[in-house]
Image (cartoon, coloured by chain):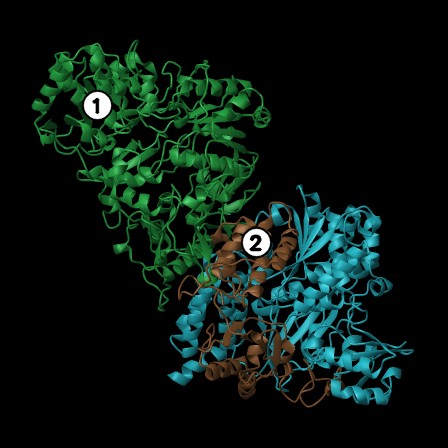
Amino acid sequence: MPKLTINGTEVEVPPGYTILQACNQAGIEVPHFCFHQRLAIAGNCRMCLVEQEKAPKPVASCAMPVADGMVVHTNSPLAQKARKGVMEFLLINHPLDCPICDQGGECDLQDEAMAYGKDRGRYQEAKRAVRAKDFGPLVKATMTRCIHCTRCIRFAADVAGVPDLGGTGRGENMEVGTYVEKALTSELSGNMIDLCPVGALTSKPYAFEARAWELRKTESIDVVDAVGTNIRLDARGQAVLRILPRVNEDVNEEWLSDKGRFVVDGLLKRRLDRPYIRRNGKLVEASWPEALTIAAERLGKASADRIAAIAGDLCDVESMLALKEVMTSLGSTNLDCRQDGAKTPAAVRSSYIFNSAIAGIDKADVVLLIGTNPRQEAPVINARLRKRYLKGGFKAGQIGPFFDSTFPVTALGEGPAVLQALVEGNHAWLDVLKSAQNPMIIMGSGAVARADGLAILDLACRLADAVGAVREDWNGFNVLQRAASRVGGLDIGFVPGPGGRDLDGILDGASKGEVEVVYLLGADEFDVSRLGNAFVIYQGHHGDAGAGRADIVLPGAAYTEKNGTYVNTEGRVQLGRLAVYPPGEAKEDWRVLRALSEHLGRALPYDSLPQLRQHMLSLFPLFAQVDDVVATAWQDFGVQGPVSGADFAYPIDTYYMTDPISRASPTMAECAVSLAPNPLSKTGTHG
Amino acid sequence: MTRIFVPRDAAAIAVGADAVAAALAEALPGATIIRNGSRGLAWLEPMVEVETDRGRIAYGPVSVADVAGLVAAGLLCGQAHPLCHGLTEEIPFLKRQTRLTFARCGITDPLSLADYCAHGGYRGLERAIGLGPDDTIEELVKSGLRGRGGAGFPTGVKWRTVQQAVGPRKYVVCNADEGDSGTFADRMIMEGDPFVVIEGMTIAGVATGATKGYLYIRSEYPHAIATMNAAITLARGAGYLGADVAGRGAAFDIEVRVGAGAYVCGEETALLESIEGRRGMVRAKPPLPAHKGLFGCPTVINNVISLASVPAILGKGAEFYRNFGLGRSRGTMPVQLAGNIRQGGLFEAAFGMTLGALVEEIGGGTATGRPVRAVQVGGPLGAYFPPALFDTPFDYEAFAARDGLIGHGGIVVFDDTVDMANQARFAMEFCAIESCGKCTPCRIGSTRGVEVIDRIRRGEGREKNLALIDELCTTMKLGSLCALGGFTPYPVLSAIRHFREDFGVAEQETT
Amino acid sequence: MSGDNGGNPVEQPASFEFTPENIARARALIAKYPEGRQASAVLPLLYLAQEQHENWVPRAAMDYIGAMLDMAPIRVYEVATFYTMFNLRPVGPYFLQVCTTTPCWLRGSDAVLDACRSKLGIDIDERTADGRFTIVEVECLGACVNAPVLRVNDDNYEDLDGPRTLALLDALARGEKPPRGPTIERQNAAPVGGPTTLTTLRFDGGGDAA
């Protein structure tokens, strides 16, 4: 390992480190704009110049690899002089419109100008200005503020894999943009806002909403997909105003999907803020006691096999457990958390999680996608796959209809027949998988959400075994869930008990009159018309399909309004935290169920969240391992049987509208219209 | 049959060489007209030469109207005529030169391989193949050859780095993006002796293990592009390029690549970006092109003149070559004289002649006849030297010691009517136009530098703004990614330092 | 002529494709570069498009070339706007390139430029109303010996000054094609007044040079 001296202190760093990385390791801060650890090195802003002894002039520390015996001064007069010169240049052109700039207060340029800037300019000529640009509904471009660091260009090209942005023109006339005006088409475009070191790219929906220092920051977990992206909720008063990603190297690195970020305005729209009871065909406002009394009456008087509960995609584990226990206390085992109709067996955990963990993607060399479009189902995981592809020595195959992938995939076919051929050894790609060092299979949630789901699982399980995807030191069998609640729901067994009805059974029963009362916990993603004449109790936070069909509405809390546990697709237990209180009379969901149990005369054995969690831990010890992936044993799963000839279908039609919150969000609605995928790109002529 | 030489060099064609050649062919059906390269006596172009028993006799500049008179006077026998200059080799401008790199230029038919070989061509490659890669490179290191593009990095050391680098493939890239105003050596050799460039690239390929060469020529040089393409086809046909070079088992081939108008593409990493089909944006170094160059592979990237000097070095031996020159500047340098100069042209000589000798003796002073006031050496990024510095020997270190650079060997002469403040402005403006826009100091500094100099020229706060331009230049020097931004301060600061009076005149006039 | 960052919109043709002959040339150009590096051919292909399309490259051509080379359109726009030799808006059949780099400039290129401006009533990077003339400013054309130089399409007109530039433009406007080369009574590149230089060379130490 090379040793170098930085500011008089000897530092030993891994070979290949840049001076900037070495400085970071030594705890020495070097200002920079263009450098970003997750992007390719550009070396263009020249703010990170340091003095290196024996070099003819200051070197850009972000681009200079360390060498043994190097002597570096980060704060020498020469380094200071160079940086002050660069800062002065940047400020010549920068508009200094901080008072009306949303970046104010969290702006790298502002911060560094405090250290390296002068209090007045020595250049009086007109500042450079560029024409306004429109990057679509999410990212607001004020390119006059741009300092040409090119982070956004590199992000779009490398991380997002959607090369929309570039630099056109030359020298002083160079402009960062799309050249031909168009909206950014990535599901990760919001990250450019975070990456932009100045106010050139800011959040369009959040424009002029708040100042950074006014916001209360709460660390939480994103629920619009099953990635479990670590987020920060920035709130003022009783409104979450924006959502930003937090760094978690194992999960989302530092990216956040556009839906996870911009869904925020949906939290204020179409909210269920008080109980409702349907009277004469219309939902009318009611009090909690009224609503709970009627709900308890209906549940209590029906026989146990004639009541059922369905949990939706955004539920926290605590409320699902409480609901399960309410139902169990009534003797019902008609439960399902798989509102997409997935056949996943809750008994075998390795059959429904992303066994390799997300970071395992970095080690995979061959990936087979089965019935999944990761770009839409988990944009952040898709970025990780692309990152792996860029590293080289990576192959991807895909079974399912064409989609516009951000990394090259070999199309193997569109239906389960290909999977069957692979298992039977009749497919050329079998050798590709077998010859891989760490083969990986990623199965979409949609691939099991079909009648032959168990047979498909069986095939996938056998394929994993056959190609060596599961070993002592490697488990490359992965299910890419897309519902945040799914793994947690399966973990606590929110599935039919012995003799119980699953989703189809419940809906069939409801339409035939065999199921009288259905309890929907935030469940909106199924065909509610199949509920027949059943009495529907909807507990949730948004007026969506479920509430529209409900006979009683019990207002609950959105994920930003409660403390709750979520288990992501990897099986990682993470805690979401309350940033604001639920609106109006709405309550945290477990409390609603606790109150209901009281009305049923079968009070749940906990009346605080700590008690509930203690209870949960005693039943399911895995929840003790917060933030970790719990080791999961490999067992066979699936049921051998015939598979249908139907092609795989992806669970998402419109990326921007997949749940009650995003459907309520005006921003997501705008995206759904303006960023609808070009139908031409789905002709199958690509790739 | 008497052989008559009429250059095909762009400088000759621009002044009517094609018409002269046609007229001569018509008037002298018995003679063989050979379209040679230029001898570099630009003011005599088209310079027609006739081969006689005494040697080649020069006539020039010849126009179509002169042809009849020349023929009548006995051109074929080298007879006297007002345009006759006697034996070409005896013309002082040529006689005083040491032509190693340009030895054949103007003497041979550029597109005759036989002519090339008859004049010592391909002896360097022959010897290189005999020596093997290690000794070839050692020979080059010993010769002391330094990059002629401007940076002056030892060519042999660069080659050794590439030879030792590991990569799936290796490349040789020849930089013919000769963008410095007032320079034309690359163009002349490509038009006048293209095979020497091919041979130099081939030796580089054989020595470093590269199998493919790209020759990047600026688009402003259509004749050089055509000549090089034709020569490459000929060399390929004769087995000097291709799967089995000269029948000795090594593979090497060359493609010509044409630029599209970007001075910065003369910077080696920007040039590589351009070949790869991107904007000519400078790459941060390291990695050096020798380790990760074209398409991410180890790459030799050299200027045309560096590569064209290699065959002579190997053909005649390192010792022979390093005996020319002085200090760390060994061998010869083709100096290009342009601007307000009487005898513009190419003058190849050993390092060490003084700047004054080059300008006054060789160049004959200014074309206007007025006194020389300033000389810009090394292209638009070179420093302005006043006559007081004319004792500076033409040598990398000697120029560097006086805050100048010899660059690619271009000398542009100005007489005493020049406004040096305007020249300083021009340097900044040139940088602003040609900046790739990647790094902050060059992108912003150049544009704002023009404005600050304008303020000085308008007489606004002269001292304050002179201090400001000095600081601006310091930031550009310290902070720029490449030589474009890093060297633009040289002409600006040298103009201010040596011609300070030009920066105060405006103030006196306006206040 | 590049640097067109979307302002002053140009009427763009809806589509572009190479002629069969140019497709063959394009394939040959692409073959010059290693497998997977076909983007290297973007410059030559842009030249081809410009040659085929009245000396300018429409956006449709950039998109077409991008598709041909498997490059994102923005990557082609980046390249086309970087290099000055690609015209991204229509230019006149008389494409006037005035060199203003040091040697030309110090020999009077300002007067040449001013003559063009005043005669044609347009500025640099503009096209006359009748569409026939376009003026651009270029860096060194490599004709420093006979500076200042104005290049009309592929021909150099040299040793210009203001009045001679006006005369040249008049001739061009009349549809004439004046002989290229020097526009003064100088013989080719010889010093004005005749080739006297050899007799005045001071090589023998007798000169008064410093």
Give the colour chain B carries in the figure: cyan
Residue matched to label 2: B277
Looking at the picture, which amino acid does disc 1 mark? Gly
Helix, strand or loop under label 2: loop
What color was chain C assigned in the picture?
brown
- From the viewer's perspective, is the residue at label 2 or at label 1 nearer? 1
Same chain check for tags 2 and 1: no
Q: Position of residue B331 (x, y in %)?
A: 75, 63
Q: Residue at x 63, y 65 (%)?
A: B178
Numbered marks: total:
2
Disc 1: host chain: A
Residue type marked 2: Gly
**In the image as oriented, which residue stretches furthest toward the right?**
B53
The shade of chain A is green
Residue B299 visible, this orientation: yes
Task: Answer whether residue A37 is visible to the viewer in this image.
Answer: no
Residue A324 lies, with reference to residue C48, above or below; the image says above
Where is residue B462? Give x, y as percent.
Answer: 41, 75
